[in-house]
């Protein structure tokens, strides 16, 4: 796949992933803004409100009717994060125009026009967004946050992350908090829209068959976006993270009315830099696969838990180990997790077959990115924003070159920073 980048004025950059492999086209706009609770809640409420209607299509029914006329195109607005930054994303999926019955009907151009309607002609009285829509979405956001609290697996991971990243933007969820959601108003949500579209850096990605017609449509659209920002003070967001340091492990035990406890361990590790792939393979061998050390030993062989798995955050050089278990087995499970790390810290304990299986699994994951225009585009823009390697073939080559000693180096550098245990006591919930 060939990737063509172009820099426009006023903080707008585009990337085109030119491929004839797919029958669909994929397009996304990704804005970066500072991660704060207020920004997260206002952006989340705004995203959902924009999907409810705009001036030209004031109801969900009318919006969907128009999208159906565009051969069942889909347009979604989402909020996510990338290290320290909050991401506000508009995503378009649409079939390629050559499959349309009307050959003179420019599907891609029409989809971009719909995005313009959503972003620049929302349903507003000039000073605030539609109050009924905003209040409805505030209630929905509050319900989602409460549901996450009630889901003990998600809650335990969230609490451990809040402790591990205390005092940094990383401790803030992409929806904010119940308090920050309650503070959202139709006016503040509208101000957030203007703040995003006028001041925040924007990365546009197209994936699909990039014909001359699409090139003209995209250039016209992004040039118009650029002109909307002329004379505005553009915002610079520091994507990199300054993480808290721990002289010793911080241990937190929190009681909960549930039959099953949850243990989440937050480790830091030393990384060689943004192209370091050894942590991926350590993660695969240690706890991220169905044949990992944690699954085969902590769960299966010793029956110390209901589940036990790891997950590495390559951009933060951090790793979480998640486990559901009974309180009386906590110390024994912790000891076995530490023992497996100790074993992996010596290259002689990592078999050639184990390393080969880990490599094949990760290489397969990266190779599969090119089988989906949307997944590859989303992966590309996240890596591009964070300043990481975006050449899939280069990453695959780096994975193939990893040795058992490289994996052992990651194990030796692991440092347990936070040990969080959600102590299940007798109750109705699992």
Image: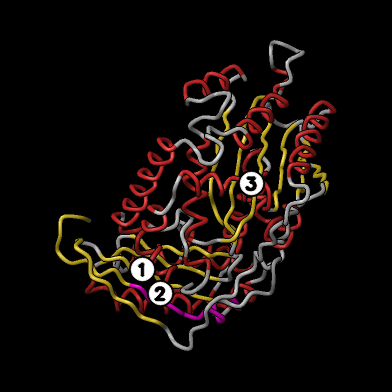
Please give the residue where the numbered disc 1 appears in the rendered image: 298
- Label 1 residue SS: helix
Disc 3 crowd rating (10 Å Cα; few below 14, some 14-19, many 20+) is some
In the rendered structure, does residue 62 fall within the stretch colored magenta?
no
What is the CA distance from the residue labelled 3 to the residue labelled 2? 34 Å
Residue occupying the point 51% across, 20% down: 62
Check the image and name the residue furthest to the bottom.
Answer: 247
Work out how far the residue at label 2 is from the one at label 1, CA to CA, in angstroms.
7 Å
Residue at the spot of label 2: 337
Local secondary structure at mark 3: helix
What are the residue bounds of the magenta stretch?
408-420
Label 3 or label 2, whichever comes before in sequence order: 2
Which circle marks residue 85 in the picture?
Answer: none
Q: Position of residue 81 (x, y in %)?
A: 56, 56
Which is closer to the viewer, label 3 or label 2? 3
Give above or below for 130 relative to 325: above
Q: Position of residue 292 (x, y in %)?
A: 46, 63
From this view, report whether residue 99 is shown above or below residue 304.
Answer: above
What residue is drawn where x is 67% and y is 47%? 367
Residue highlighted by disc 3: 378
**Left or right position of 318 against 422:** right
Nearer the observer, 255 or 192: 192
Tag 2 near tag 1, CB within 8 Å? yes
Q: Residues within 10 Å of mark 1 (few under 14, many from 20)?
A: many
């Amino acid at each position: 796949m060939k990737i063509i980048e172009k820099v426009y004025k006023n903080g707008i950059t585009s990337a085109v992933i030119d491929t004839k492999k797919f029958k669909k086209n994929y397009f996304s706009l990704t804005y970066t803004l500072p991660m704060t609770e207020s920004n997260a809640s206002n952006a989340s409420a705004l995203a959902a409100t924009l999907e409810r209607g705009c001036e030209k299509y004031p109801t969900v029914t009318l919006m969907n009717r128009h999208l159906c006329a565009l051969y069942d195109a889909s347009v979604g607005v989402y909020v996510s994060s990338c290290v320290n930054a909050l991401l506000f994303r508009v995503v378009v999926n649409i079939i390629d125009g050559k499959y349309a019955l009307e050959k003179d009907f420019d599907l891609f151009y029409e989809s971009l026009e719909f995005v313009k309607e959503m972003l620049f002609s929302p349903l507003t009285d000039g000073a605030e967004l539609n109050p009924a829509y905003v209040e409805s979405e505030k209630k929905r956001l509050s319900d989602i946050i409460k549901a996450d609290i009630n889901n003990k697996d998600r809650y335990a991971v969230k609490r451990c992350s809040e402790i591990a990243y205390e005092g940094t933007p990383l401790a803030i969820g992409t929806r904010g908090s119940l308090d920050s959601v309650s503070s959202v108003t139709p006016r503040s949500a509208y101000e957030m829209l203007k703040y995003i579209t006028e001041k925040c850096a924007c990365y546009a990605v197209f994936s699909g068959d990039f014909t001359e017609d699409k090139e003209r449509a995209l250039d016209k659209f992004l040039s118009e976006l650029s002109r909307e920002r002329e004379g505005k003070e553009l915002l610079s967001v520091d994507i990199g993270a300054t993480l808290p340091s721990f002289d010793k492990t911080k241990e937190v035990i929190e009681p909960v009315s549930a039959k099953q406890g949850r243990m989440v361990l937050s480790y830091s590790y030393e990384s060689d830099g943004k192209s370091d792939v050894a942590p991926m393979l350590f993660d695969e061998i240690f706890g991220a696969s169905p044949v990992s050390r944690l699954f085969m030993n902590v769960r299966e062989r010793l029956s110390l838990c209901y589940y036990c798995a790891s997950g590495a955050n390559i951009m933060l050089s951090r790793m979480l180990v998640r486990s559901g278990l009974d309180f009386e087995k906590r110390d024994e499970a912790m000891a076995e997790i530490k023992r497996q790390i100790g074993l992996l810290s010596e290259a002689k304990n990592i078999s050639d077959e184990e390393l080969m299986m880990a490599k094949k699994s990760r290489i397969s994951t990266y190779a599969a990115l090119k089988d989906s225009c949307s997944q590859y585009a989303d992966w590309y823009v996240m890596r591009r924003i964070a300043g990481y390697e975006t050449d899939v073939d280069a990453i695959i080559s780096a994975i193939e070159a990893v040795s058992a000693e490289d994996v052992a180096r990651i194990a030796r550098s692991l440092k347990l920073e936070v040990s969080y245990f959600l102590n299940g006591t007798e109750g109705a919930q699992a």
